[in-house]
Amino acid sequence: MQIYLARNNQQAGPYTLEQLNQMLASQQVLLTDLAWHQGMSEWKALGELTQGKLVYEPQGYVSTPPTPEHSPFQNTDYTATNTSRPSSASSNSRTQATKNELASINQRALAKIIDMLLWLPAAALPSFFLNADQFEQLSGLQQKMQAATTSDQAMQLQTELFQLIPMQAWQAVAIYLLIMLGIQAFLLAKTGQSIGKRLTKIKIVDAETDEKVSLMRVFTIRSIIFIILNMMFMPFITILDYGFAFGAKRQALHDKLAKTKVVKQ
């Protein structure tokens, strides 16, 4: 078995399994280093292959006595001597480490805030269709809703508020929402980025292959379904959804269901 390693956009190898385990034991290579060998479709972190242990034990492999090996990352000229590289990953060997870097929680939160702010104009649109008297009535109803003591009173006032807003205003809101959904769907399908993610330089990819994700997964499952759930069960779904993002792979609940992850661009 010939195993290739990569760290900081540099590739080393090939090494035998015994050499790899010897270097793991002496911490010459780290669990965060990337590895590839024949039979793998992509580069993966050593820690994922070893399941967090300092020894790699692939199934069906018969070991041979280990031979001493220097650290693969101490020789600054090793890339010039290692001409044999895995064909399935050679084109990405210098970018794989960056490609797999997960987006930070702060980046994801900022992207979400930006995306949410883009929906606020929909709430402001009805005010442009009200005359002075209607606007005063609207303000009065909003104050009464805040002072309502029972759910029945709040629902009655909410009904009156909706009836006060003219049909043209609702049509304008619907058009704005459809335009925003269309823009977001187009960007997500094309680049895996919403407007917020584009500005924060992060993107959505397949959790296993790092490839672009289909519109059904990236938009319908990750966005539409959870928009509806958040409207129905706010704030419980929001808290539950993003609570998952603090895991090792930083996958929110909608990421897990869509089998996606968010990485730096």
Image (spheres, helix red, strand yellow):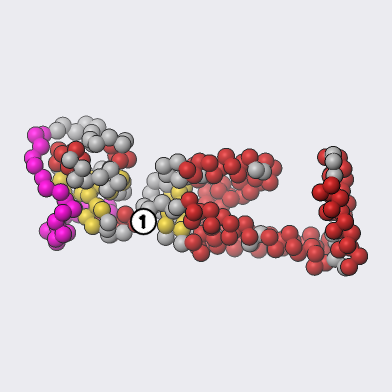
Q: Is residue 62 above or below residue 15?
A: above
Q: Amino acid at mark 1?
A: Lys
Q: Residue 204: percent from the left, percent from the top?
A: 47, 54
Would residue 73 appear left or right of 101 to someone viewing this image? left
Which residue does the image show at 28% across and 48% down from the upper left?
Answer: 34
Residue 69 appears at what percent x and percent y?
10, 45
The answer to which of 210 and 129 lies nearer the viewer is 129
Q: Position of residue 87 (x, y in %)?
A: 24, 54
The residue nearer to you, when weighing 87 against 239, is 239
Magenta residues (range) = 64-89
Q: In the rendered image, which residue does mark 1 sit on?
A: 99
- Answer whether residue 187 is magenta in the image: no
Q: Position of residue 84 (x, y in %)?
A: 16, 55
Where, quadrant-wise, is the C terminus in this rendering?
Answer: bottom left
Q: Secondary structure at mark 1?
A: helix
Q: Quadrant of the N terminus?
A: top left
Position above or below: 247 against 85: above
